[in-house]
Amino acid sequence: MFFSSSGSESNDTNVRMVRRYWDLLGQPQRKVIIGRLNGYHGSTMAGASLGGMSGMHAQGDLPIPDITHIGQPYFFENALPGESEDAFGLRAAGWLETKILELGADKVAAFIAEPVQGAGGVIIPPATYWPEIQRIVDKHGILLIADEVICAFGRLGHWFAYEKFGIRPDLVTFAKGVTSGYIPLGGVMVGDRVAKVLIEQGGEFNHGYTYSGHPVACAVALANIELIERENLVGRVRDDTGPYLAERFAELNDHPLVAVAETCGFVAGLVLVKDKATRATFDPDLGVGMMCRAHCFKNGLIMRAVGDRMIIAPPLVMTRAQIDEMMALIHTCLDATLAQLRAAGQHA
């Protein structure tokens, strides 16, 4: 473990650690780290560069050198006509290999990605995506970094999302859920492949933060993890409330505004569209997502707008009755948004 105070600091640490690893192996030219468009890895210079948010890159001359990006595995937006989710998952993973070959495998240090993209709109990859990513990184010998700031500590019904998706990351970024946000704490879980080289060949790793491993933060994390275990929140999300949320959230697929509603554990997202039959989207200038968000806030519901994709990440302690209450509010807010759009002549 290498402790920090946030996911941003942890991902800065990843850049330092990855490049130090390859330097120690006598391959200093392996500097390039590949991320994904619309991915989110924090807001520091390195974190924002690793992420693929165009709005962040527009400020501060980002990304910094030797960081590049591939497309995101977003089926709704990027699938070809008639393409299955499985076929799309393989094709989207293939973008990584294309980029590696374009750059030269001997120049690529690592690939970083969120198992499920959070801030980018709860982008849930097809089942075929992660196994193919693992095959590609293994084939070319590059490191795999799983940014689990959103996904870890039970969010997807597993302690870590890499368990759910069956991948073997070399580095795992964590924060948020480790303390449930009560006190700042983040860090990097360092796999044996990297740790062995850094420890046995590297000497002192000249990197750290003022509050790395702060005893108060770590005490809060231990207490928080004990509570998660005692309440069996991970198992509850996996076996009970997660499947129930999936069942209830799927009902939104019948709403006139919704093209697709999907969940993964205790994250969920839906897409607002102008024409359900053709999946035609709204003019971005209308700000339909923000319109919907305003109705949500007015009715006591927190649902985030990422463009015209509405996302939720409920507390892991939520009960079935509270899921029912939330779903009733979502229906109310979608109906109010639809009524506003129809009144403005923007929906049939």
Image (tube, rainbow, N blue to C red):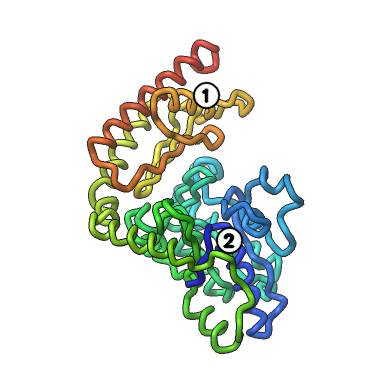
SS at circle 2: helix
Give the quarter of the image for residue 54: top right
Distance between mark 2 and mark 1 Cα atoms: 34 Å
Residue drawn at x 33%, y 60% is: 223
Residue closest to the eye, 329 or 163: 329
Coordinates of residue 197 in the picture (x, y in percent): 56, 84
Q: Is residue 200 above or below residue 182?
A: below
Q: Residue furthest bottom?
A: 200
SS at circle 1: helix
Coordinates of residue 58 in the picture (x, y in percent): 73, 45
Residue drawn at x 44%, y 36% is: 270
The answer to whether residue 86 shows anywhere in this view is: no
What amino acid is at disc 2?
A: Glu
Left of 152 or right of it: where is 110? right
Residue closest to the eye, 114 or 90: 114
Coordinates of residue 42 in the picture (x, y in percent): 58, 53
Q: Which residue is mark 2?
A: 9
Residue drawn at x 33%, y 36% is: 250
Q: Is residue 177 above or below residue 30?
A: above
Coordinates of residue 330 in the picture (x, y in percent): 37, 28
The answer to whether residue 89 shows anywhere in this view is: yes
Q: Local crowd at mark 2 within 10 Å, few (<14), some, or many (≥20)?
A: many
Q: Which residue is mark 1?
A: 291
What amino acid is at disc 1?
A: Met
